[in-house]
Amino acid sequence: MPYAGTCVVAAVLVATEPDTFVSRRVEAVEVDLGGIPGDRHHGLTRPAGSREPMYPRGTPIRNRRQLSAVSVEECAAIADGLGLDAVLPEWLGANLLIKGLPELTRLPAGARLLFPSGAGLVCEGENRPCRHPGEVLAALYPLYPEREALPVRFVQVARGRRGIVLSVERPGRIAQGDRVRIWLPR
């Protein structure tokens, strides 16, 4: 059953610099079965890390984090919860900014995001917050009260609002302004 509502791609972003997860805006991307070519998360596999304690670090595993998406509304809620003017998707390393789905993070694993080109992404689950975006925010807001606590505060405030991670099910083009159809699993 499709999601009843209008969702739009408000921004498309890529993280191509090897020394940072911070992404930058582009007009569109062509996704393949590994994600966004040139993006730091591209690939069919990735090394296991702290989020997969059942495997030794570095073990090749299926890449369930080929792309990440956040919503305009959840970014605004995070900013409000932290007392900041804004939290931009690039500071979170997101690939897609979605408008019109205020509870994007609550999409269940298996939900599909379908784009006009025929591209299809599968929600693999919530993108659990970590300290790294909070460290970026601390650097961007040097006058923030208790700035050294911002990484930990970010994790607390972003829990349940950090967006989702996705894998590519069907290659295609994703562009700013695309309407997104959401298909929920039965």
Image (spheres, rainbow, N blue to C red):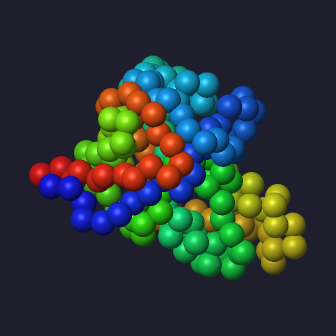
> Which is nearer the eye, 71 or 55?
71
Q: Residue at x 53, y 48 (%)?
A: 176
Q: Residue furthest left?
A: 186
- Residue 110 in sight: yes
Residue at 68% in and 53% down = 91
Percent across and percent down for residue 174 are 47, 39
Q: In screen coordinates, is 39 left or right of 164?
A: right
Q: Is residue 113 above or below residue 107?
A: above
The image position of residue 74, as x and y in percent, is 51, 68
Q: Is residue 53 visible?
A: no
At 72% from the left and 29% from the top, the residue drawn is: 18
From the top left corner, tell me how far across and down residue 38 is, in percent. Answer: 61, 25
Left or right of 47 in this view: 183 = left
Quadrant in the picture for residue 144: bottom right
Q: Which image quadrant is residue 108 in?
A: bottom left
Quarter of the N terminus within the rendering: bottom left
Residue lying furthest right: 143
Q: Measured along the vertical axis of the image, is residue 10 above or below residue 101? A: above
